[in-house]
Amino acid sequence: MGYEWLTEALARLRDIETQEVTQVLSAQRRLPLAAESAGVHFLTINGRTGTGRPLVVAVRLLGGHRQQIIGAREMTPEELVRFKAWEADAS
């Protein structure tokens, strides 16, 4: 799967390194969830970095096996609870 950055998304990263985003996208255990905002459909990929930091990475399908990274952020406390429950169930 090939990923490319939306230029604006890269510019908006705050306190998240690009390699952390890559780590989440390439993690063996990640939780993809369908999402929509302003009529745009995309996926959120919930996962952990190599150091265990929980992040949400938003991507949209461009076609074929290409996806565009449109955002990344830390999980909210509620998202983290849901993710931890998923991790426990997936073990």
Image: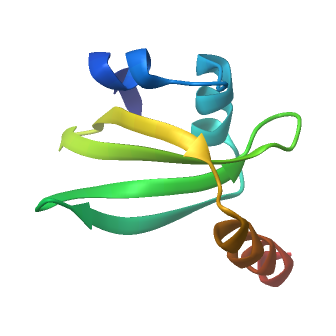
Instruction: Spot the residue most to the left.
Output: 39
1 sits left or right of 29 in the view: left
Q: Is residue 47 above or below residue 78?
A: above
Q: Is residue 66 above or below residue 28?
A: above
Q: Quadrant of residue 39?
A: bottom left
Residue 40 percent coordinates (x, y): 15, 56
The answer to whether any part of residue 80 appears in the image is yes
59 sits left or right of 37 in the view: right
Residue 91 percent coordinates (x, y): 86, 75
| Residue at 76% in and 38% down | 49
| Residue at 29% in and 21% down | 8
In the image shown, does 31 or 39 lie closer to the viewer? 39
Residue 77 percent coordinates (x, y): 72, 66
Q: Is residue 3 above or below residue 40?
A: above
In the image shown, does 61 or 8 lie closer to the viewer? 8
In the image shown, does 65 or 14 lie closer to the viewer? 14
Figure colour scheme:
rainbow
The answer to whether any part of residue 6 appears in the image is no
Q: Quadrant of residue 30?
A: bottom right
Residue 63 percent coordinates (x, y): 16, 40
| Residue at 80% in and 43% down | 53
Q: Quadrant of residue 6?
A: top left
